Image (cartoon, grey):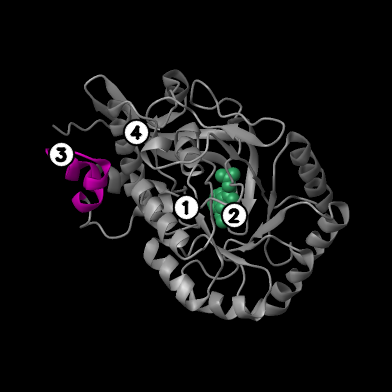
Amino acid sequence: MLIRIPLLNPFETSFGRTSVKEAVIVRLDSGDSQAYGECTAEREPYYSYEFNSMSWKVISDLILPMLAGAEISSPLDFGTLTHRVRGHSMSKGAVEMALWDLFCRSAGMPLHRAIGGVRKRIECGISIGIQDSVDTLISTIARSLDQGYRRIKIKVKPGWDTEVLERVRTEFPDIPLQVDANAAYSLHSIRTLKDMDRFNLTMIEQPLDYDDLLEHSILQRRIRTPICLDESIKGDESVKLMHRLGSGRVVNIKAGRVGGIAGSLSVHDTAMERNIPVWIGGMLETGIGRSFNVALNTLPDVRFPGDTSPSSRYFRRDIIVEPFEMDSKGRMPVPSKNGSGIEVDERELERWTAKRKILKLS
Ligand code: OSB
Ligand code: MG
């Protein structure tokens, strides 16, 4: 299905503004079981080259047909089956995650257990988009802290950076604070980036180009604030390069960006072996995609609160029966049910579905 569901508040990053969440949802039916995955591509190719109308095609014309008639004994077989398709990690990830859901449901096991999770509840952070004014940002931060969020991340871009941070630090001198540039700077802005060192930021996420590791390594040598890579991490190879080059000190894991759960696990393990902490990012997912982010948040090398906020931050009503909730201390329980642990609210899903296609795979 292709769904379009309004966001409660528009979300603005350095590359654009979103007011409607659009996503390709994959449902796999086998016997009585139904499993779901969500593609994290967006409507336009601004975060990465993938985008929804392309993902729709890649998923329905390429990836799903590759599973037809195949003997799949584990979701780990997915990588081999779809290896011929280069890239398209978000499209692959949607199907791969649905397969994990399906297998864990039929094995009677929650996903967090299948992947070696070590905690029963996770810590939530909030990613706050670019606002119309600094006053609005300050009141949004205050509200988020009241709600219990354990760390604040604010989006920055040239012209919305050091002056804004100055105000934020004046109002909130000691809160755990980090920024995300979504690749908006170049080394020409090195003075601004160096200047951010005075704000005691936990990290600066993806300051330079979306595919870059080399210039980040030059930048990391010149700033004290740890660089966290998001866009640049395409899989475990990127982590090895980041480590070898010194391009950053923290890794943001988003399952879609690295091809799904298996890709996330290999990024996680590669980082952990090198003593690099990770945390789990988000792409404004519905409850379906969110459930996988929650499971990944239970992994041992996750050492920071993630961008996994409760459903109510994004939607008036999520498309799952029991929305994800956060307590007043910024913690979220991990569902204990099998698979991804959620139950999709079919009526709500139907309500936002713009397009659907059914394929018979066996
Ligand atoms: O860079 O982390 C990002 C949303 C869309 C695209 C990229 C990013 C984001 C977020 C939102 O920061 C995090 C969330 O899901 O709340
Ligand atoms: Mg990011």
SS for dot 2: strand
Is residue 212 among what the camera can see?
A: no
Residue occupied by mark 3: 68
**Counting residues from the N terminus, which is met first, the one under dot 1 or under dot 2?**
2
Residue occupied by mark 4: 101
Q: Quadrant of residue 289?
A: top left
Q: CA distance from mark 1 to mark 2?
A: 10 Å
**Counting residues from the N terminus, which is met first, the one under dot 3 or under dot 2?**
2
Q: CA distance from mark 3 to mark 1?
A: 29 Å
Tell us which disc is closer to us: 1 or 4.
4
- In this orientation, which residue lies closer to the viewer: 166 or 145? 145
Residue occupied by mark 1: 44
Looking at the picture, does residue 287 appear above or below residue 88?
above
Main secondary structure type of the part rendered in magenta: helix
Q: Quadrant of residue 309?
A: top right
Q: Position of residue 149 (x, y in %)?
A: 70, 40
Three-letter amino acid code at disc 1?
Glu
Residue occupied by mark 2: 16
Label 4 Cα neighbours within 10 Å, binned few <14 / some 14-19 / many ≥20:
many
Q: Residue at x 39, y 60 (%)?
A: 235
The verdict on residue 327 being magenta is no
**Counting residues from the N terminus, which is met first, the one under dot 2 or under dot 4?**
2
Q: Residue at x 41, y 49 (%)?
A: 256
Three-letter amino acid code at disc 2?
Gly
Q: Residue at x 56, y 29 (%)?
A: 324
Three-letter amino acid code at disc 4?
Asp
Cβ of disc 3 within 8 Å of ligand 1?
Answer: no
Label 3 Cα neighbours within 10 Å, binned few <14 / some 14-19 / many ≥20:
few
SS for dot 3: loop
Are circles 3 and 1 on residues that touch, CB within 8 Å? no
